[in-house]
Amino acid sequence: NFSDQIKIYSLNTGETLELKISDLKSYNDEKLCLVVKCLQRCLLSEGIDLEIFCDFGPGTGLGGSSSLTVAIIKALSELFYFQITNQQLTDICYDIERNDAGISGGWQDQIAAVNGGLCVTNFRLNNIEVHKISLSQKFEDYLNSSLFLSKIGTTRKSDTIHRDQKNVSNDLSYRPKMQAIVELADKSSALIGDERIDELGKILHEGWLLK
């Protein structure tokens, strides 16, 4: 905006934030914190007007904060002409959420937002492998028409869920359950890759019970 002002507006929550470029580095309030952390990471040195809008509100468990972070960093990379690979984008957005903003969680939401589509992710000790499942347009349309999201009117904080998960991670039943969930993920990707989804609903239900 050719000034020293940063203006942020959230269309979802109605929140607005205005601050000077000189105050960006020291900003540490809760209001629109994640958005500001993205601007801090990019070392923003010019005034900017930023409007954000999400298809759903916070606390729904659909990975909205990761999608927002990825969208902002990607938009800034296009605006200021700096090259960024998918892996770099994933790493940066993970670091912003987990370390800069202090939001607990794993890598899966950033990976999904960066790569798009249906992905199979193999987590190793030293690296992460991401493979996209190639779908025909006909099957993708059929799959989309077979899945529904229903708003149930409640929200939750991921920090609480991850804290609870960490507390039970030493339980004897934890590792077998996690292994069973991984096996279900492998089975699901195979079914989708073969364009067979008759058993997918049952697998989703079984996975939910394990969780």
Image: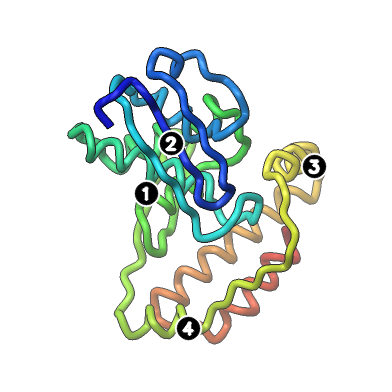
Mark 1 or 3 closer to N-term?
1
Mark 2 or 1 closer to N-term?
2
The residue that mark 2 highlights is: 93
Residue 183 horizontal/vertical position (percent): 58, 62
Q: Residue at x 34, y 26 (%)?
A: 42
Q: CA distance from mark 2 to mark 1?
A: 9 Å
Mark 2 or 3 closer to N-term?
2
Q: Disc count in the image?
A: 4
Q: Residue at x 29, y 24 (%)?
A: 3
Mark 4 or 1 closer to N-term?
1
The residue that mark 4 highlights is: 145
For disc 4, the neighbor class at 10 Å (few under 14, some 14 to 19, many from 20) is few
The residue that mark 3 highlights is: 168
The residue that mark 1 highlights is: 114
In what element is the residue under mark 4? Answer: helix
Amino acid type at image mark 2 = Cys
Relative side of 84 to 116, left or right: left
Mark 2 or 4 closer to N-term?
2
Mark 4 or 3 closer to N-term?
4
Q: CA distance from mark 4 to mark 3?
A: 37 Å
Amino acid type at image mark 1 = Val
For discs 4 and 3, the disc positioned in front in the rendered view: 4
Relative side of 103 to 171, left or right: left
Amino acid type at image mark 4 = Ser
Q: Residue at x 57, y 77 (%)?
A: 148
Q: Are marks 2 and 4 in contact (CB under 8 Å)?
A: no
Q: CA distance from mark 4 to mark 1?
A: 23 Å
12 or 148: which is nearer to us?
A: 12
Of the 4 image quadrants, the one containing the C terminus is bottom right
